[in-house]
Amino acid sequence: MRYLTIAIGFALIIMSPETLRPQAAVDTLLSVGANATVEVENMIGDITISTWDRNAVRVQATGAADVHFDSEDSEVSVEAEMVPDGEGRATDFTLTIPVDANVEVHTIEGRISIEGTTGRIDAQSVKGLIRVNGGRNTIDVGSVEGGIEISGARGRVEAHSVNEFVSLTDVVGDIEATTVNGPVTLERCDTQNLEASSVNGAIVFRGPIHSDGWYSIDTHNGTIDITIPRSANATISAFTYNGEFEADFPVTVTEAEPGKATTITLGSGDAQIELETFNGAILLKRSDR
């Protein structure tokens, strides 16, 4: 185990008060093995991660914190430790990691961007947008005061926000996408198990419906807009208390009692689709695929 601490001396430039703030600069290279895990902990500041085909992690950082490394063959951890005179100011990280590396990144206030890894991803921010392109196996992403954008993931995706949007594009695998105040948008998502929910926001789903699939979509205040492929075999249970139910293609509807769900059977009815909104419309659209 190698433990390295880098504390770069600060340069003072006699200019405006802003330039009097000390700024640390870090640029170092750490060797790792295959499928290593890269961990980044930051209090305030952005974290940007991209990949290359080398068995090494390059860490670049600028800001007001001391940067600490803990490195071994299977794991590299990077942490920004705020110094007394750096309180409340950001330290931004830019990392280049092996393409097969796993990623675990956390910041309290800052944006996170992860691009190109084929490893698993765990990215959490209290206040900041999280953007992920890629990821395999398990992709767990969450922000309280920030939106979520995920594209090109292959594996189980869990995406959660509290007060912003969740957007998934070109994702293959099981999906759990939730927010309290914001929309959930799922475009070209190929999943057999879907749980999508919002309290105050619309939900859109575009993707294939697998005969052995289960799809649960619910919102309290918002529209549900779902595209149904022409070849789908599904039983749809649709409930809206204060909104319209519309389908842009002919359907056989089993009329339900007031306050109960409407049931629609397509083909052999194998897949199970549950749609529920309290204040909002349910819109079924046809796809030729």
Image: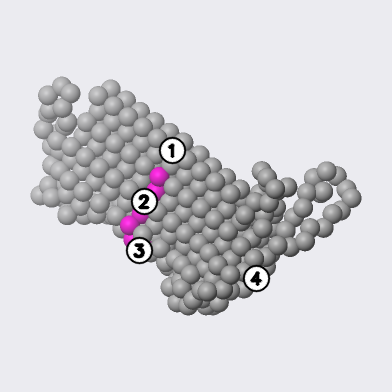
Q: Are marks 3 and 1 in contact (CB under 8 Å)?
A: no
Q: In the image, what residue type sits under mark 3?
A: Asn
Vertical placement of residue 288 versus 32, above or below = above
- The image quarter containing residue 286 is top left
Q: Are marks 4 and 3 in contact (CB under 8 Å)?
A: no
Q: Which badge, 4 or 2, comes first in the chain's sequence?
A: 4
* Residue 60 or residue 181, whichever sits in front: 60
* Residue 157 belongs to the span the image colors magenta: yes
Q: Which badge, 4 or 1, comes first in the chain's sequence?
A: 4
Q: Secondary structure at mark 2?
A: strand
- Between marks 4 and 2, how big is the CA–CA gap? 32 Å
Residue at 33%, 39% (x, y): give it.
Answer: 197
Instruction: Please tell me whether mark 4 or mark 2 is closer to you in this view.
Output: 4
Residue at 68%, 51% (x, y): give it.
Answer: 83
136 displayed left or right of 3 = left
101 displayed left or right of 196 = right
- Pointer 4 residue: 28
- Pointer 2 residue: 158
- Pointer 1 residue: 162
Magenta stretch: helix, strand or loop mostly: strand
- Give the image location of residue 232, x and y in percent: 19, 50
- Between marks 3 and 1, how big is the CA–CA gap? 24 Å
Q: Which mark is residue 137?
A: 3
Q: Are marks 2 and 3 in contact (CB under 8 Å)?
A: no
* Residue 16 belongs to the span the image colors magenta: no
Residue at 47%, 59% (x, y): give it.
Answer: 104
Q: Secondary structure at mark 1?
A: loop
